[in-house]
Image (cartoon, rainbow, N blue to C red):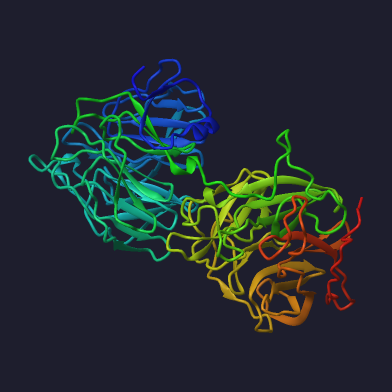
Amino acid sequence: MRKGAIRGAFSAIALVLAAPLAAQWQTVESADGSQPVARHEAGFVAVGDKFYLLGGRGIRPVSIYDPRANVWKQGSPPPIELNHFQPVVHDGKIWVVGAFTGKFPNETPVDTVHVYDPTTDRWSLGPKLPEGRVRGAAGAVVVGRSLYLIAGATKGHLGGQVRWADRYDFATKAWTVLKDVPHFRDHFQAVTDGNAIYAYGGRITGPDPDTFHRTVAEVDRFDLAADSWTVLPQRLITQRAGAMGAFADRKFWLVGGESGERPRALAETETLAGDFRPWETATALVQERHGTGLIAWGGYLWTASGNNMRGGGAETTTMERLPLDSAAPAAKEPFLQRLPDGSWPNPNPTPGNPIVETYRGADPDAHVWDGRVWVYTSQDHDPPEGERGYAAMDGTHLISSANMVDWTDHGEIFNADMVPWSTDSGKFLWAPGACRKNGKYFLYFPIKDMRKNWVIGVATGDNPWGPFKESGRPIPGTSGIDPMCFIDDDGKAYLYFGIHKVARLSDDMLSLAEAPYDINYGAENFREGAYMAKRNGVYYYSYTDFEDRENQGYYAMGKSPYGPFEFKGAINAKPEGAQDHHSMVEFKGRWYYFYHWGNFTSPYGFPGRGNRRNVAVEYMYFDPDGTIRPIVQTRDGVAKVK
């Protein structure tokens, strides 16, 4: 076995634990000697927990890699030669779009998307590219429910570069022409951080002697919210084409490639930090290569196959991986500790309030599904010395109960490190909001994007506890914090967020179906924490005024999710040691008010305070006219229900 090579079966967990302190690219040799089919000008992409190497010069079978077992196997070849493309994934299938077919230098663009289904190992045809805008060697990326096709060339290696940008909507099955890209380029890969699409690397290919020399140094950025292009001031350190790109560890990566300056392919690895510092040099590949792809998975970057020389003639079967910084996240001081058997302790060992004692949870978002109350909370951690109490909040936690007294802890189900398009790793993931629709669960979360603006993201899962996968971008049109999702009796869903904003959600729950409305709630003391409940046909819009030292929970009543609402006043006094942030639900014939305290000393000896909060619950009572009586905060809490 070569020096620096890795062989044998391993799991994703083992990969994380084994990551070396000084990150270096490592050659990966399979456990059974299996290899991918050598190729270049190909695609390399992950679907679930498998990697797929497909296309390239000639017609080659799909090579499938299982990173847990560390073995390769072969799948079906495409119906035609597909080369010079960037594969994307939608609905568990691989789309090959913006490809060439044929031999150098007269390759022709492929006018139809080719789709590979990993579950059936079959190829099929997808939509046609927009008329008059067919090209190959283009960049492609999926964000949310849309596919973006960027730049490319129309005449193979003989030229015909275009600055086109097009968007395909998976729901409507329609293409939209976007504004032109600032720079011509082909032989590159598009990359997204969820907020924008970036085009970097590539060249303007032409006949000899201009095949390899006219590389592009500029980085073009497409703002997804503004639908507009800008050019970043940071130019590439090493100009190249045929390189691999990805966004991981809150950095843009540029790996390998080829240029007219060298006969061999390139091994250089360079990164651009998400806050747009200058490009930096990272560790080089073990083996030079170009014309393949880059996968971020299991705490590593992975690349396989490609060509070792500029142009063709030296295809390789090797694979390498690079440990990411996120493979060994910085340690935190959690208040929750697992039991020796790995399970979570009972979060409420003593009856009464608070209902969560074993971890610091706040901002309860309560729901009733399938005969249980499910409460999503934020998590408090002690902040660094000198920082504000909320400067270390991270992680969404979930508890549930069938009787309001005996609670089950489902542990941390989401955290900031699962959001690659955010600047906030390990902090500033604040109050969550959840929904269930059509058998799917949606977790809405506030976090800062790459420009450090508060936005709302969404993650989806098949169970109340997930596992959750975020959508890949913030929800366009959102801002601020404290998302709350409300589904009305007619099935329409609404998102409340920011400073008294509301908008109806799209059918897929991943975007807004309309521009946000400002809510008229009959007062001017809204600060945060909007909540919507419905009782007897009346909509209850409630919120928090944390600046009020006496009362903090307020509400208004209306006849529509949008309002207008009639202000009714306070419902909850300022909780001890904290501020009011609440939710309201009806369960087995009674209404309950969830909020949090900051005055409880945990079983681990940590006293309560503003950044060490715990969830509590009280009964709610309504007068005949539907108004809410003030909440009485108690240590006894609520009784068990059958």
Give coordinates of residue 515: x percent, y percent.
53, 70
* Residue 117 in view here: yes
Q: Quadrant of the N terminus?
A: top left
- Depth check: give the residue in front, 511 or 621: 621
Q: Is residue 290 left or right of residue 114?
A: left
In the depicted structure, whether residue 2 falls above or below residue 486: above
Answer with the quarter of the image where residue 233 lies: bottom left
- Looking at the picture, does residue 174 appear above or below residue 323? below
Q: Residue at x 68, y 80 (%)?
A: 521
Q: Position of residue 468 (x, y in %)?
A: 60, 46
Q: Position of residue 378 (x, y in %)?
A: 65, 57
Q: Is residue 66 above or below residue 410?
A: above
* Frontmost residue, 629 versus 19: 19
- Camera-nearest residue between 641 and 81: 641
Q: Residue furthest left?
A: 209
Give the x, y percent position of residue 243: 27, 40
